[in-house]
Amino acid sequence: MLFKNANIENGAVRASECSTQETADCKAEEGLLDMRVKNGKFAEIGANLTPEDEEEIIDLRGKLVLPPFIESHVHLDTCLTAGEPKWNMSGTLFEGIETWALRKENLTKKDVKDRVNRAVRLQAANGIQFVRTHVDITDPKLTAMEAILELRDELKDFVEIQIVAFPQEGILSYPNGKQLMVDAVNMGADAVGAIPHFEFTREYSVESLNFAMNLAAEKGKLVDVHCDEIDDEASRGLETVAARALELELFDRVTASHTTAMHSYNNAYVMRLMRLLKMSRINFVANPLVNTHLQGRADTYPKRRGVTRVRELTAEGINVSFGHDDIFDPWYPLGCGSMRDVVFMGLHVCQMMGYEDIMNAYRFVTVNAARTLHISDRYGIEMGKPASFVVMDAQNYYDALNYNSPVLASYRNGKKIAESTPGAKTALF
């Protein structure tokens, strides 16, 4: 199969801004390249490739081609439950947790699998092929964990699901929490989670992180901590996460998600903390949609934006990706599984609206997210790697973001798994 005239990761735009001798991209007319796919992998990428005998040819006509989108932080087990059994009227994280605890009482494996199947198809239609989901294990029956482990295998040809064993109500603060975490990991969870800011005490917070990090090191698992998702500047689980990642040599196998308290830390503390963060090499995930909605609820005015220091972390060379977090559940009453919405909101609240910021923003939900999920070795539009990519109805990512361009097609290992037909809009004057 030969894909002609692909604008790979804004390559045509870069080519238009340089002479034909400056870069390899410029050797292609208008910066467009061809991609040959064989046996589900990129066999050749270059300018003006000659079709082989009886080879299927698809002309992309200069459309933007990106690696598949990655959802690096979502809760599939809670998706599509908003209003059940009640609405989160305060809009706070804590009422969301209380509401989910009520909904969890009626959880069945069928219920979880039906909802997750619907959510994953929404994601696939939006070009998502990799999902890291946090699954609540503060449930003596581990119902959701069992259901999503089954779905991970059932849906593997269409989406790769990575599972974090997530203690929504705490490890130390929930009955038998440590054993439930061990059980979930032994069942097949890919990563160990924690929620230090929700534990009863500071001592519990530190002990829960020590337990989670040691367990991950022992079992060879990744780590993804819901870390300091609160407006309290005294919530400083992040320093413990980074220190343990460094000491246990887990490094980039560790992710700190949310870290919204970081927007309330004083700058002198952040300057000291940044040294440890760089040494630890941990990843960060920001969730602009949900945390802009949840945070600052105790503020009158001025109100805090509620998102971690994305610009500052990125400037220090620290890996940051974006996640949707919640899809129509007790914490967020909207959501259709589109990573475009996440990026769009993230650029606004993080004040990253320069031209290059916008053009490169796709990296938060592609290559940066691949580093977070620890899959970079088999991800990306490169020869020899799986032929997985999306085609967008735009010439570059700036236009794709600005005009909310649809994903025309999503290919996984050379096979089309989703497609859409763009609608036309015409002013009648």
Image (cartoon, rainbow, N blue to C red):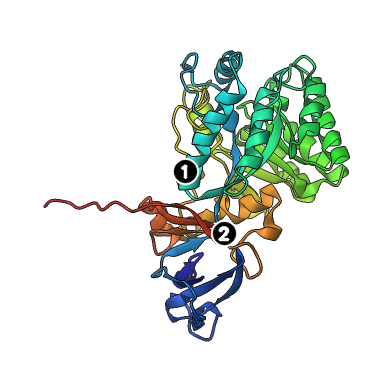
Label 1: how many Cα within 10 Å (few below 14, some 14–19, many 20+):
many
In the picture, residue 97 is in which quadrant? top right
Q: The residue under label 2 is which amino acid type?
A: Ser
* Residue in the foreground of this view, choosing between 371 and 337: 337
Residue 91 vertical placement versus 242 (above, below): above
Q: The residue under label 1 is which amino acid type?
A: Ser
Residue 208 vertical placement versus 278 (above, below): above
* Residue in the foreground of this view, choosing between 207 and 223: 223
* Residue in the foreground of this view, choosing between 119 and 10: 119
- Pair 2/1: label in front: 2
Which residue bears the numbered disc 1?
338
In the picture, residue 203 is in which quadrant? top right
Question: From this viewpoint, which residue is outermost toward the front?
Answer: 54
Question: From this viewpoint, which residue is outermost toward the left?
Answer: 429
- Marks 2 and 1, how far apart in space? 18 Å
Label 2: how many Cα within 10 Å (few below 14, some 14–19, many 20+):
many
Task: Point out the tag, 2 or 1, that comes first from the N-terminus.
Answer: 1
Which residue bears the numbered disc 2?
388
**Rendered location of residue 38, percent (x, y):** 59, 69
- Element type at mark 1: loop
- Identity of the residue drawn at 38% across and 53% down: 405
- Element type at mark 2: loop
**Rendered location of residue 54, percent (x, y):** 48, 77
Q: Which mark is residue 272?
A: none
Q: Is residue 159 visible?
A: yes
**Rendered location of residue 332, percent (x, y):** 49, 28
